Amino acid sequence: MKGFAMLGIGRTGWIEKENPVCGPLDAICRPIALAPCTSDVHTVWAGAIGDRHDMILGHEAVGEVVEVGSLVRAFKAGDKVIVPAITPDWNSLEAQGGYQMHSGGLLAGWKFSNFKDGVFGELFHVNDADGNLALLPKGMDPAAACMLSDMVPTGLHGVELADVQYGDSVVVVGIGPVGLMAVAGTAIRGASHIYAVGSRPNCIQLAKEYGATDVINYREGDIVEQILAKTEGKGVDRVIIAGGDVDTFDQAIRMLKPGGRIGNVNYLGEGDYIKIPRTEWGCGMSHKAIAGGLMPGGRLRMEKLASLMETGRIDPGKLVTHHFVGFEKIEQALMLMKDKPRDLIKPVITI
Ligand code: NDP
Ligand code: ZN
């Protein structure tokens, strides 16, 4: 079969591979809708998780089940399914301990395009199908549903990590597709002021539609100064980081009230250390907490997030700005993600 792969750091291309083999608990799927991710860009061009050779990329997909293993109960060939980016081993000790995304080791619940071939293949393998797949609800647009693989769960996980409460003032740093879903989730959680940090006009427009009350442009001045000016020097209750770099943590600590909380879902592709400003961190006694996490996957999570879409509570279809048709368009869509033209939020390929 054919797949679009990372050949090595900074190198991609089409390759031929053997068809994946279905174990008793697994499923083999073919893609119906696919999306490249900023994480694919970090992985290939920043070499953020180390070198990978001839590894098929991609971890965001809606697919059709082609084959299931003998022990799979909930799915059969022909089912249309949402495939989460994170597919844990549900019997691992880490999953039993509540951290399914690290099943088998740090970040090891993230298998597609990390430890095994991803979804940019004519066929792809899903471990623990009953635990990880979810049926695509009838009538749901596969291109929009593809946002359930990663953008929705990651953005909403930022909200969970920051533990947003009713009436909280919240800064969302970064309003690409992940940050935009964090804005939408923050609004659902009952935040009061939602300060969205970004610069692209279409992202700013969508941030307002999803519930941002204020927009901060990081290209027009220091974001800490801008936030402190808007909050009479007090800062905010929560900061969700969905963009920026290692220096963003320094800014987040400075704009946070004592007892505040940072939820990070940004994939830090570069830099060795994160600096925490000593004085603004209360010389170590500020009760300003930092939580960072990989999105949770799994069937229950996918079903719940799909129901948020079905009831109209979130509308991630609006993230899709570029729609390609045909498997071979994967390459073009990924390059678009790498180059990030100003009008891009998220590209999707349907097959
Ligand atoms: P985008 O590149 O589309 O968006 C990044 C956002 O950050 C943009 O709004 C950009 O602004 C803003 N930004 C860039 N630099 C700065 C800066 N210095 N200060 C403040 N804001 C800045 O990324 P995505 O939304 O696709 O993804 C966000 C991150 O989430 C990525 O690192 C991705 O790898 C990661 N991720 C993490 C996952 C997880 O499980 N934890 C899963 C999926 C993705 P502008 O408007 O100028 O572009
Ligand atoms: Zn992703």
Image (cartoon, helix red, strand yellow):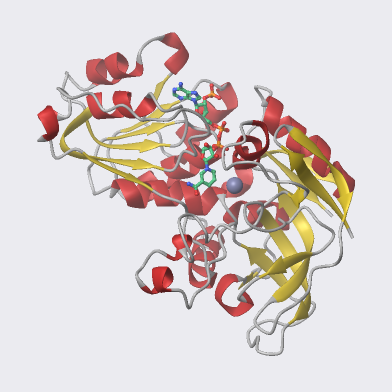
Q: In which quarter of the image is the N terminus?
A: bottom right
**Pick the front one: 40 or 326:** 40
Residue 321 position (above or below residue 199): below
Give coordinates of residue 148: x percent, y percent.
58, 56
Image x and y of residue 149, in percent: 60, 56
Q: In this view, does 44 lie above or below 301?
A: above
Q: How many marks?
A: 0
Which picture quadrant has residue 195? top left
Residue 227 seen by the camera: yes
Quarter of the rendering containing residue 196? top left
Please say if 246 is above or below 161: above
Q: Quadrant of the C terminus?
A: bottom right
- Tell me if residue 315 can be seen: no
Query: Residue at horizontal 44%, vertical 66%?
Result: 100
* Residue lying at 47% horizontally and 40% vertically, measured from the top left: 210
> For the point 30% across and 29% down, which residue is it?
252
- Residue 275 sits above or below residue 116 on the image: above
Residue at 69% x, 85% y: name it: 24
Q: Nearer the viewer, residue 235 or 17?
A: 17
Task: Using the image as rendered, state which of residue 32 and residue 120 is in the foreground.
Answer: 120
Please identify the residue farthest to the top as the structure is shown.
220
In the image: residue 42, left or right of residue 178: right
Residue 211 place in picture, x, y as percent: 41, 38
Q: Quadrant of residue 318?
A: top right
231 sits left or right of 113 in the view = left
Q: Which of 19 and 53 is in front in this view?
A: 53
Horizontal arrangement in the rendering, residue 338 relative to residue 78 (left or right): left
Q: Where is residue 311 in the image (x, y as percent from the top left)?
A: 51, 62
